[in-house]
Amino acid sequence: METGGPTPVHRCAGRGIIATFDLIEELEVFETLSPDVVLYDVLGDVVCGGFSAPIRDGYAEDICIVTSGEKMSLYAADNICKAVANFRSRGYGTVKGIILNRRNVEDEYERVKAFAVERNLPILADIPRSKDIQTCEDKGMTVIEGLPDSEISRIYRELAQRLLQDEAEE
């Protein structure tokens, strides 16, 4: 489900996220579909209560932070870590680990590794920059759909298996 956002400068995107969760509850989406996994992709660089809704309202159990080695991406990842820490005493979600989504910046792995070590978090996956992603995106497909035998598809499947296996072991 893609919720989009408001016209820039006219409304708050965080409010849109809150409205989305209200609608999900009203339509009983989780009860009807019974999904095994639900992914939320929210901005980490915006310090806004609406963006913390998946954590704050109990929709998120395990949080995987996707970051590159770019300074602002790591800053956003740190904001998410701080938001999760804010809710720790209430028994909300926990950060499961870091997913490195490479942008091919200098010393990228080392930067992200240092970030992860400082926060005692594992790097769950190291996703290389791949033209296959844009190629499939231009066709309106994921790489799993468009290029199922590609190296990047294998990496995504391995990440999915790791997350599901970790969940089964808990």
Image (tube, rainbow, N blue to C red):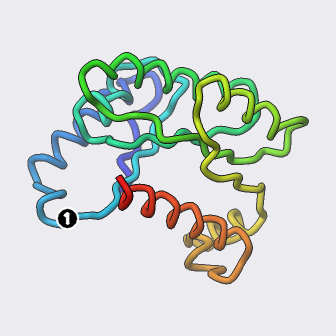
Q: What x and y, as percent, mark residue 33?
A: 19, 66
Q: Is residue 39 left or right of residue 75?
A: left
- The answer to whether one can see residue 73 in this image is no
* Residue picked out by circle 1: 34
Q: Nearer the viewer, residue 43 or 123?
A: 123
> Is 109 placed left or right of 85 in the picture?
right
Q: As drawn, which residue projects farthest toward the right?
A: 106
| Quadrant (top left/top right/bottom left/bottom right) for the N terminus | bottom left
10 Å neighbourhood of mark 1: few (<14), some, or many (≥20)?
A: few
Residue found 59% across the figure and 41% down from its top: 98
* Picture mark count: 1
Of residues 26 and 152, the one nearer the viewer is 152
- The residue at 69%/27% (across/down) is 115
Q: Position of residue 120 (x, y in %)?
A: 59, 29
Residue 33 visible to the viewer: yes
At x 22% / y 41%, what residue is drawn?
21
Residue 112 horizontal/vertical position (percent): 73, 34
| Rendered view: 74 above or below 107 | above
**How far across and down, in percent of the image, does residue 42 sit?**
45, 38
To which quarter of the image does residue 23 belong? top left
Horizontally, residue 11 falls left or right of residue 47, namely left
Amino acid type, label 1: Ser
